[in-house]
């Protein structure tokens, strides 16, 4: 499935860390009624979790690189 994703939002989700991501997933999964925004948030969190588990070094490098870019622009 090809999905347009926001790199900034994905990076923010990854920067939360694995523990926090798992807590958020548990929180949102317990909601009975899931509106579209919650489904999208869960999709983003699951993707971030997958990236952190499969390749933590690359995820850390990405977060650091984007923080560096952000600091240069401000």
Image (cartoon, rainbow, N blue to C red):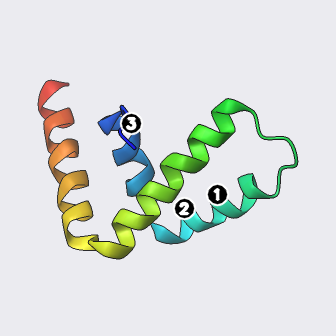
Q: Secondary structure at mark 3?
A: loop
Q: Secondary structure at mark 2?
A: helix
Give yes or no for contact between labels 2 and 1 (Cβ–Cβ under 8 Å): yes
Q: Earlier in the sequence, mark 3 or mark 1?
A: 3
Disc 2 designates what residue? Answer: 21
From this viewpoint, which residue is outermost toward the top? 74
Image point (65%, 65%), residue name: 23
Q: Earlier in the sequence, mark 2 or mark 3?
A: 3
Disc 1 designates what residue? Answer: 24
For residue 8, above or below residue 26:
above
From this viewpoint, which residue is outermost toward the right? 32
Q: Position of residue 72 (x, y in %)?
A: 11, 32
Q: Residues within 10 Å of mark 1 (few under 14, many from 20)?
A: some
Disc 3 designates what residue? Answer: 3
State the residue in front, 22 or 54.
54
Asked whether, in this view, residue 10 is left or right of residue 34, the answer is left
Q: Secondary structure at mark 1?
A: helix
Image point (38%, 44%), residue name: 10
Of labels 2 and 3, the one closer to you: 3
């Amino acid at each position: 499935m090809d999905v347009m994703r926001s790199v900034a939002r994905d990076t923010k989700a990854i920067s939360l860390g694995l523990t926090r991501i798992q807590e958020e997933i548990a929180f949102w999964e317990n909601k009975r009624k899931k509106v579209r925004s919650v489904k999208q948030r869960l999709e983003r969190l699951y993707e971030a979790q997958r990236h952190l588990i499969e390749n933590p070094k690359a995820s850390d490098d990405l977060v650091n690189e984007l923080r560096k870019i952000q600091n240069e622009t401000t």
